């Protein structure tokens, strides 16, 4: 698991105007909360935070707040919908040894059998893991899976120390026949209204 140290500064100004000034200074407004403490309004260096958040469920060591370093996990990351820059981050304070529920990416490994393809319905899965030992992903080996095979949440081989926090019956993926095309069905459906229209025209002409 990746752990990144990052320096924080307390925030004393609030509102949209203050947030814009913080971002213009190259920093990101954030809130650190958890363990029954009062939420702490802080700002974090934008470039360092952006690099850290490239790792899913990165563990941040927040320094510079006066009470010693705090461990935190990103829980809500808000980005500008057009430009993509960081607007605001909520950070959940955690402790070593504490169990937390997080979403892990589902990563496929291996190759499907000839004539088959993967229909993946879930790209993430919720698991419970120790806060300082969160795996980066859950791997699913699709080698040798035959057409019509399914992988449910209960079939996942989770990393050591990790337990499933989602419904066991969630469909993760299925192997489908790559040679079966739905195009003829679509063409048939498109042809039906045209045929009905032609029949209507014929009835009108007969009248």
Image (tube, grey):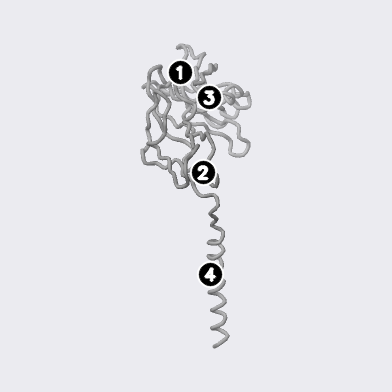
Residue indicated by mark 4: 192
* Location of residue 36 by image quarter: top left
Between residues 131 and 154, which one lies in front from this camera angle? 154
Which mark sits nearer the N-terminus, 4 or 1?
1
SS under mark 3? loop
SS under mark 1? strand
Q: Position of residue 187 (x, y in %)?
A: 57, 63
Q: In the image, which is nearer the foreground, mark 1 or mark 2?
A: 2
**Pointers 4 and 1 in contact (CB under 8 A)?**
no
Between residues 53 and 152, which one lies in front from this camera angle? 152
Q: In the image, which is nearer the foreground, mark 4 or mark 1?
A: 4
Q: Please give the label number shown on residue 71.
A: 1
Residue indicated by mark 2: 118
**Pointers 4 and 3 in contact (CB under 8 A)?**
no
Instruction: Determine crowd level at label 2: few under 14, some 14-19, many 20+ residues with C-alpha closer than 10 A.
Output: some
Q: Is residue 104 above or below residue 161?
A: below
Q: Please give the label number shown on residue 13.
A: 3
Seen from this angle, which residue lies furthest bottom?
A: 207
SS under mark 4? helix
Between residues 203 and 65, which one lies in front from this camera angle? 203
**Pointers 1 and 3 in contact (CB under 8 A)?**
no
Instruction: Determine crowd level at label 4: few under 14, some 14-19, many 20+ residues with C-alpha closer than 10 A.
Output: few
Which mark sits nearer the N-terminus, 2 or 4?
2
CA–CA distance between discs 1 and 3? 24 Å
Q: In the image, which is nearer the foreground, mark 1 or mark 3?
A: 1
Q: Position of residue 84 (x, y in %)?
A: 60, 35
CA–CA distance between discs 1 and 2? 38 Å
């Amino acid at each position: 698991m990746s752990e990144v140290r990052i320096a924080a500064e307390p925030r004393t100004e609030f509102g949209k105007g203050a947030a814009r000034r913080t971002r213009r200074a190259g920093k990101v407004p954030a809130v650190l909360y958890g363990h029954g403490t009062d939420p702490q309004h802080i700002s974090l260096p934008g470039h360092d935070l952006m690099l850290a958040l490239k790792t899913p469920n990165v563990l941040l060591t927040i320094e510079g707040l006066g009470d010693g370093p705090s461990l935190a996990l990103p829980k809500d990351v808000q980005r500008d919908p057009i430009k993509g820059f960081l607007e605001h981050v909520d950070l959940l304070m955690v402790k070593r040894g504490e169990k937390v529920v997080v979403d892990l990416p589902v990563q496929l490994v291996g190759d499907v059998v000839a004539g088959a393809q993967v229909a993946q319905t879930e790209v993430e899965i919720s698991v419970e893991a120790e806060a300082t030992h969160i795996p980066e992903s859950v791997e699913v080996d699709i080698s040798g899976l035959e057409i019509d095979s399914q992988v449910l949440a209960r079939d996942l081989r989770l990393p050591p120390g990790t337990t499933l926090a989602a419904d066991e019956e969630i469909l993760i993926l299925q192997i489908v026949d790559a040679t079966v095309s739905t195009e003829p069905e679509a063409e048939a459906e498109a042809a039906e209204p045209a045929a009905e229209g032609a029949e209507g025209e014929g009835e009108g002409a007969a009248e």
